[in-house]
């Protein structure tokens, strides 16, 4: 879905974790095209530098910071670099995450989703640490210094709401917990005017996240990375003033906008 650019983020500074590919890269580039200077964060240095280059091609400043969000020391150093370089932070996107198909996480990443009895402790702890502790560490380091009136977008998953088929318990639990944390932090930051919302594509997206999955019959690709951008730009901009503690689905947001003509003021 094409997104019209209007400069609605001009003068703002955005930090996007997990920005070396997929949804994180797409959001970082879209923010730059809308006028934001962008700090992009991930572990894959070469791919991260490529994201930063795309942001600079949009005419904005971009800072690539290699960082493992599960390492508190690295997170604190990363946040310090953002404020040292840009002097402020208006938009924080917690996108870094792994799923049950991550290479090296499971003995056979090509197998279907495992049941709880088959889930190893390593798989459980790796997923929870990256998907839940990681955002916690970034929030803890960044929130006290964020610009009043700024926003946080936590990237969750529709699987957290529709976990009825079994399998993938570690991943689904991490995303359900992140959505709950979103609502809690939204209340804690309300007086500062910092909006805290959750966002997910609302569709299966063909990205590196599912790169090892051979059998796609149970999770067919239904969208590309662009599906999340209209909702991400809405939540990152002043268009969403007073919208906080909500969970938006990108695909549903696009359908609502096409039908009604205005963005939904509440999530699902």
Image (cartoon, grey):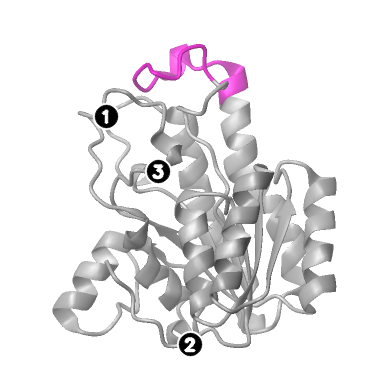
Q: Which residue is mark 2?
A: 7
Per the picture, the main secondary structure of the magenta-coloured stretch is: loop
Identity of the residue drawn at 52% across and 46% down = 177
Q: Residues within 10 Å of mark 1 (few under 14, many from 20)?
A: few
Circle 3 sits in a helix, a strand or a loop, which is it?
loop
Identity of the residue drawn at 84% across and 64% down = 80
Q: Which residue is mark 3?
A: 207
For residue 165, which numbered disc appears in the image? 1
Residue 84 occupies quadrant: bottom right
Circle 1 sits in a helix, a strand or a loop, which is it?
loop
Image height check: is 58 above or below 79? below
Q: Is residue 100 left or right of residue 122?
A: left
Residue 45 versus residue 223: which sits nearer the camera?
A: 45
For residue 73, which numbered disc appears in the image? none
- The quadrant in which the C terminus is found is bottom left
- Contact, mark 3 vs mark 1 (Cβ under 8 Å): no
Q: Is residue 48 left or right of residue 73?
A: left
The mark nearer the N terminus, 3 or 1, is 1
Pair 3/1: label in front: 3
Circle 2 sits in a helix, a strand or a loop, which is it?
loop
* CA distance separating discs 3 and 2: 27 Å
Give the x, y percent position of residue 59: 58, 79
Q: Is residue 24 left or right of residue 4?
A: right
Image height check: is 208 above or below 142? above
Give the x, y percent position of residue 116: 44, 19
| Picture mark count | 3
The magenta segment: 106-123
Give the x, y percent position of residue 133: 66, 44
* CA distance separating discs 2 and 1: 42 Å
108 is within the stretch colored magenta: yes
């Amino acid at each position: 879905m094409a997104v019209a650019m209007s400069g609605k983020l001009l003068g703002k500074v955005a930090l996007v974790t997990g920005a070396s590919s997929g949804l994180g890269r797409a959001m970082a580039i879209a923010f730059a095209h809308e006028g934001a200077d962008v700090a992009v964060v991930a572990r894959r240095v070469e791919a991260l530098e490529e994201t930063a280059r795309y942001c600079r091609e949009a005419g904005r400043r971009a800072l690539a910071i290699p960082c493992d969000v599960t390492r508190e020391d690295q997170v604190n150093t990363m946040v310090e670099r953002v404020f040292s370089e840009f002097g402020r932070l208006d938009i924080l996107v917690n996108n870094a995450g792994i799923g049950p198909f991550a290479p090296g996480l499971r003995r056979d990443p090509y197998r279907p989703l495992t049941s709880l009895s088959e889930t190893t402790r390593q798989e459980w702890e790796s997923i929870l640490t990256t998907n839940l502790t990681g955002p916690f560490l970034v929030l803890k380091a960044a929130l006290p210094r964020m610009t009043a009136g700024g926003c946080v977008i936590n990237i969750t998953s529709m699987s957290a709401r529709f976990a009825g088929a079994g399998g993938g318990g570690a991943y689904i639990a991490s995303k359900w917990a992140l959505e709950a944390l979103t609502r809690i932090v939204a209340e804690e930051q309300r007086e500062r005017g910092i909006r805290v919302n959750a966002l997910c594509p609302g569709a299966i997206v063909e990205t590196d996240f599912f790169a090892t999955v051979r059998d796609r019959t149970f999770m067919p690709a239904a969208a590309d990375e662009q599906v999340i951008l209209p909702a991400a730009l809405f939540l990152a901009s002043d268009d969403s003033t007073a919208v906080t503690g909500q969970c938006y689905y990108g695909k549903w947001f696009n359908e609502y906008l096409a039908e009604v003509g205005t963005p939904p003021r509440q999530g699902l």
